[in-house]
Image (spheres, rainbow, N blue to C red):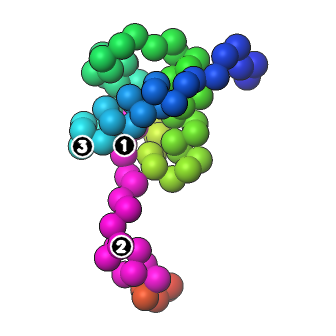
Amino acid sequence: MKIIHYPNLKTVLMIESTLKKANKLLTREQLKKKLPKKIMHQTLNIILEYLEQSGKILDGRKGILWIYNPSPKLEQAIKKGVEV
């Protein structure tokens, strides 16, 4: 994919905030409708790819879901957990 222009931080934060508040699975079209400003489809895809690579969202066939949880208790439980 050839990137014409990269998104700015304000746009990334706008999408992060919208996904956090949703608390449910959203399609790309539903996400676009919930955003306070219009966004180009390519820009949205770049941001979603970044968020998925950084472990903040899951982007599947049925939609996008915010999964990031910075809870220190969760982090400790994961570290103490036993891998099966």
Q: Is residue 45 visible?
A: no
Q: Identify which residue is drawn at 51% across, 53% down.
A: 55
- Per the image, the residue denoted by label 1 is 65
Res 7 label: none
Q: Name the image quarter holding the N terminus.
A: top right
> Could you tell me how far apart the alpha carbons at marks 3 and 2 are, in whole angstroms?
20 Å
| Left or right: residue 23 compared with residue 16 | left
In the image, is residue 72 part of the stretch drawn in magenta? Answer: yes
Count of numbered badges drawn on the protein: 3
**Residue at 70 percent of width and 14 percent of height:** 4
Residue underneath mark 3: 23
Front residue (pair 53, 70): 70
Q: Secondary structure at mark 3?
A: loop
Can you give x and y, in whole percent of width and height, for residue 67 in the image?
Answer: 38, 52
Which three-letter amino acid code belongs to the residue tagged 1? Leu
Residue 36: x %, y % from top left: 30, 17
From the viewer's perspective, is residue 71 above or below residue 78?
Answer: above
Using the image, determine if residue 54 lies above or below residue 51: below
Q: Residue 72 got which mark? A: 2
Q: Please tell me which residue is depicted at 52% across the width and 15% down the height of the picture.
A: 41
Estimate the spatial distance between the alpha carbons at disc 1 and disc 3, rounded to whole Å.
8 Å
Give the amino acid type for the residue marked by disc 2 in the picture: Pro
State the extent of the magenta-drawn residues as a range. Answer: 62-79
Q: Secondary structure at mark 1?
A: strand
Q: Residues within 10 Å of mark 1 (few under 14, many from 20)?
A: many
Asked if residue 23 can be seen in this view, the reply is: yes
Say what secondary structure mark 2 lies in: helix
Q: Residues within 10 Å of mark 3 (few under 14, many from 20)?
A: few
| Residue name at image x 55 percent, y 25 percent | 8
Q: Amino acid at mark 3?
A: Asn
Residue 44 placement (x, y as % from top left): 51, 23
